[in-house]
């Protein structure tokens, strides 16, 4: 059965207008959430770690920035928008001791609750509102009078109001303008991790590099290979985003269409699909999350090595060169 879709006309904004909201973290998601909430009439303050470089950014945007103890004493809803790798430690040491019964804590992603890295006391409302876009999209769509789709979930409903708070929050940041759907922390976390690994980041960047390398190894110029394998990705992605797969196919040449239907499954073959199943199994089992946690605990050595290596890849050198020499 299809998930229900709720829009602004279905959602009461009052449950968030009658609450004081502290956004903890002022980065990719925290900043646009806070700005959209304020523009929707919500009382918002920002809580940041003393050493955070985002403090000055929040102050420049006109927010009152508070230490955690003051922020939590003031707030009814504490929205946690910190990176996953630091959230558990910050929550345990700096937030949990300050929380009081009946407060609500919210998340923009389900991972730390799903994996049990954060274990809220049972007298708290625990909810999630996860816009399906990067933070820049959340803000830009709101300013344009629209929004991005959002998912919401309730993990604990201590006061009986967690769902109405989550929906009102989703409306206040603009998601209700497009549509809000229910999910669970587990579903959002697993699907989000899988899509990042298999398609949006890991799969896409590796596919681009492999295709580029294949052309260059055969003697074709790096510049032309760059245009064909990286630059044009946005053009196809925009068609897919706006019109779906069928619409994209209606918008490309007949040659490209034949290449799509005749060769796509040779590239993404049974072996790739089996690898995807293994990736998903490792996410569901918690193996991936534990490996990630260990990576961050040891200072991100593998991430640093991989990023440094790929910064020197010929496709990145070509990108930098062409961006300097051409007017895009």
Image (tube, grey):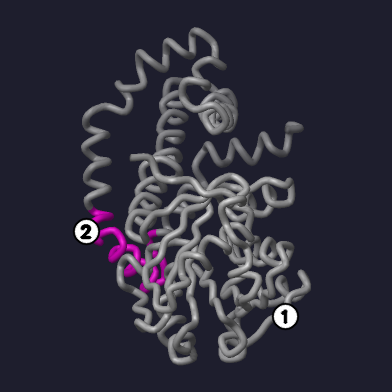
Quarter of the figure with residue 222 = top right
Front residue of this view, candidates 71 and 320: 71
Residue count near mark 2 (Cα–Cα under 10 Å), binned few <14, some 14–19, many ≥20: few
In the rendered structure, the answer to whether residue 161 lies left or right of residue 74 reads left
Nearer-N-terminus badge (2/1): 1
The magenta stretch spans residue 299: yes
- The residue that appears at 65% across and 85% down in the rendered structure is 66
**In what quadrant of the picture does the N terminus appear?**
top left
Task: Kindly state the secondary structure of the residue where label 1 is placed.
Answer: loop
Residue count near mark 1 (Cα–Cα under 10 Å), binned few <14, some 14–19, many ≥20: some
Quarter of the figure with residue 297 = bottom left
Q: Which residues are magenta?
A: 282-302
Compared with 174, 249 (above or below) is above
Which residue lies under the disc numbered 2?
285
The magenta stretch spans residue 178: no
Question: How far, Cα to Cα, is label 2 from label 1?
Answer: 41 Å
Front residue of this view, candidates 319 and 69: 69
- The residue that appears at 69% across and 50% down in the rendered structure is 140
> Is residue 222 at least partly visible in the picture?
no
Task: Kindly state the secondary structure of the residue where label 2 is placed.
Answer: helix
């Amino acid at each position: 059965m299809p998930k229900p879709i709720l829009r602004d006309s279905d959602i009461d904004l009052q449950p968030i207008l009658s609450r004081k909201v502290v956004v903890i973290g002022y980065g990719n998601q925290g900043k646009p959430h806070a700005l959209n909430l304020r523009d929707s009439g919500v009382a918002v303050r920002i809580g940041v770690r003393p050493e955070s470089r985002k403090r000055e950014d929040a102050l420049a945007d006109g927010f009152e920035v508070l230490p955690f103890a003051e922020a939590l004493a003031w707030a009814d809803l504490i929205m946690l928008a910190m990176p996953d790798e630091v959230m558990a430690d910050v929550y345990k040491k700096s937030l949990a001791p300050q929380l009081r019964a009946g407060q609500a804590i919210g998340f923009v992603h389900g991972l730390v609750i799903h994996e049990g890295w954060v274990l809220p006391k049972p007298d708290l409302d625990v909810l999630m509102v996860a816009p399906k876009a990067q933070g820049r999209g959340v803000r830009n769509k709101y300013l344009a009078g629209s929004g991005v789709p959002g998912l919401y979930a309730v993990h604990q409903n201590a006061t009986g109001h967690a769902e109405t708070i989550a929906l009102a929050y989703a409306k206040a940041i603009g998601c209700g303008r497009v549509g809000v759907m229910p999910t669970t922390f587990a579903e959002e976390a697993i699907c989000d991790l899988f899509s990042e690994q298999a398609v949006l980041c890991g799969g896409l960047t590796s596919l681009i590099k492999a295709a580029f390398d294949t052309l260059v190894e055969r003697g074709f110029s790096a510049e032309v290979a760059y245009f064909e394998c990286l630059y044009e990705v946005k053009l196809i992605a925009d068609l897919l985003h706006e019109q779906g797969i069928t619409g994209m196919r209606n918008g490309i040449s007949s040659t490209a269409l034949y290449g799509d239907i005749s060769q796509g499954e040779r590239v993404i073959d049974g072996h790739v699909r089996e690898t995807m199943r293994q990736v998903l199994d490792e996410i569901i089992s918690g193996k991936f999350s534990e490996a990630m946690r260990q990576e961050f605990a040891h200072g991100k050595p593998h991430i640093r090595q991989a990023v440094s290596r790929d910064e020197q890849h010929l496709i990145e050198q070509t990108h930098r060169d062409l961006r300097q020499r051409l007017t895009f």
